[in-house]
Image (cartoon, rainbow, N blue to C red):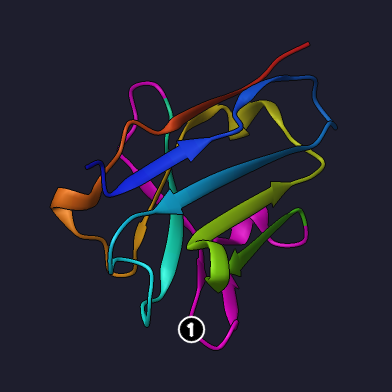
Amino acid sequence: QVPLVESGGGLVQPGGSLRVSCVASGGIFSGKAMGWYRQAPGEQREWVATINVGGITTYEDSVKGRFTISRDNAKNTVYLQMNSLKLEDTAVYYCNTVPWAQNYWGQGTQVTVSS
């Protein structure tokens, strides 16, 4: 069983919005801080946002005010609402625990911002 499954990516114009989702299996989600990460072409994977068990959130500076991370504990799901998207947000988006666990990486979901 795949530990984490991301979905919801797609093609969007600059300034547009998109929401990506991540469903966790087993005991991965419960009691853990969850995060979103992204990897742009030719770049290293980078952290984007974190939500802890109590719902406190933190963001990488470039997405503050534009992205919102949330979680639904009943559904073992974490979301990333992305607004005012920019060309530089183009990347494969992944979820994982915070700190990340190597064996939890899923296939990610591609977000492409293009006019």
Residue 112 coordinates in the image, percent (x, y): 61, 20
The residue positioned 46% from the left and 39% from the top of the image is 6
Residue 42 coordinates in the image, percent (x, y): 33, 22
Tell me the SS state at disc 1: loop
Quadrant assignment for the N terminus: top left
The residue positioned 57% from the left and 45% from the top of the image is 21
Q: Residues within 10 Å of mark 1 (few under 14, many from 20)?
A: some
* Camera-nearest residue between 24 and 37: 24
Farthest residue to the bottom: give it: 54
* Picture layout, residue 74 above or below residue 42: below
Is residue 22 located in the magenta-colored stretch of the structure?
A: no
Is residue 42 located in the magenta-colored stretch of the structure?
A: yes
Farthest residue to the left: give it: 103
Give the extent of the magenta segment: 41-65
The residue pinned by badge 1 equals 53
User: Which of the 4 image quarters holds residue 41?
Assistant: top left
* Camera-nearest residue between 57 and 6: 6
* Picture layout, residue 89 above or below residue 59: above
* Picture layout, residue 91 above or below residue 46: above
The residue positioned 60% from the left and 67% from the top of the image is 72
* Picture layout, residue 110 above or below residue 22: above
The residue positioned 61% from the left and 41% from the top of the image is 20
Residue 69 coordinates in the image, percent (x, y): 63, 62
Farthest residue to the top: give it: 115
* Camera-nearest residue between 103 and 36: 103
Circle 1: residue type:
Val
Compared across the picture, whether 111 is left or right of 82 comes to left
